[in-house]
Amino acid sequence: MPQNTKTIKQLCLSMAAYSSASIFGPLILIGGIGYFLDRLFDTKPVMLIIGVFVAFITTNVLLFKKIQVLMKWIDQQKGQKK
């Protein structure tokens, strides 16, 4: 049982790290590109808003894919216990 507890803790920590990176990574990268495009073309806040929206969509896609992988792993663990 201690092995299983360690695995669950590792899974929770990795999911928290992945979730944080999936949220802040696209927001900083794509939002930053939008900010610089706004400054370049003098279209303040249009490109930034578009960048944040695209980052939101990207974040949702990344998290959805990770949840699918997690659900498959949980199903495999259930199958091994039987």
Image: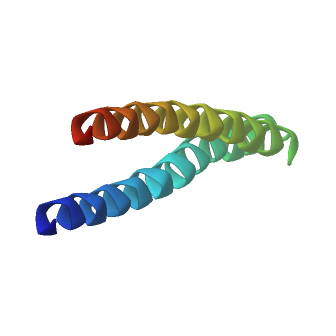
Q: Position of residue 3 (x, y in %)?
A: 12, 62
Report the residue that reaches farthest toward the front.
82
On-image quarter of the N terminus: bottom left
| Residue 71 shown left or right of residue 1 in the figure | right
Name the residue: 50% across, 38% down: 67
Q: Is residue 50 left or right of residue 22?
A: right
Name the image quarter holding residue 14. Answer: bottom left
Is 15 on the left-hand or right-hand side of 45? left
Question: Residue 31: x and y, percent?
Answer: 65, 45
Nearest the viewer among 78 and 65 is 78
Residue at 29 percent across and 40 percent down: it is 77
- Out of 32 and 8, give the one closest to the viewer: 8
| 59 shown above or below 14 | above
**Residue 48 percent across, percent down from the top left:** 77, 44
* Quarter in which the C terminus is drawn: top left
At x 54%, y 54%, the residue is: 24
- Visual colour scheme: rainbow
Q: Nearer the viewer, residue 32 or 67?
A: 67
Residue at figure coordinates x 50%, y 46% from the top left: 22
Q: Dividing the picture into quarters, in which one does residue 54 lie?
A: top right
Q: Name the outermost residue toward the left.
A: 3
Q: Nearer the viewer, residue 5 or 68?
A: 5
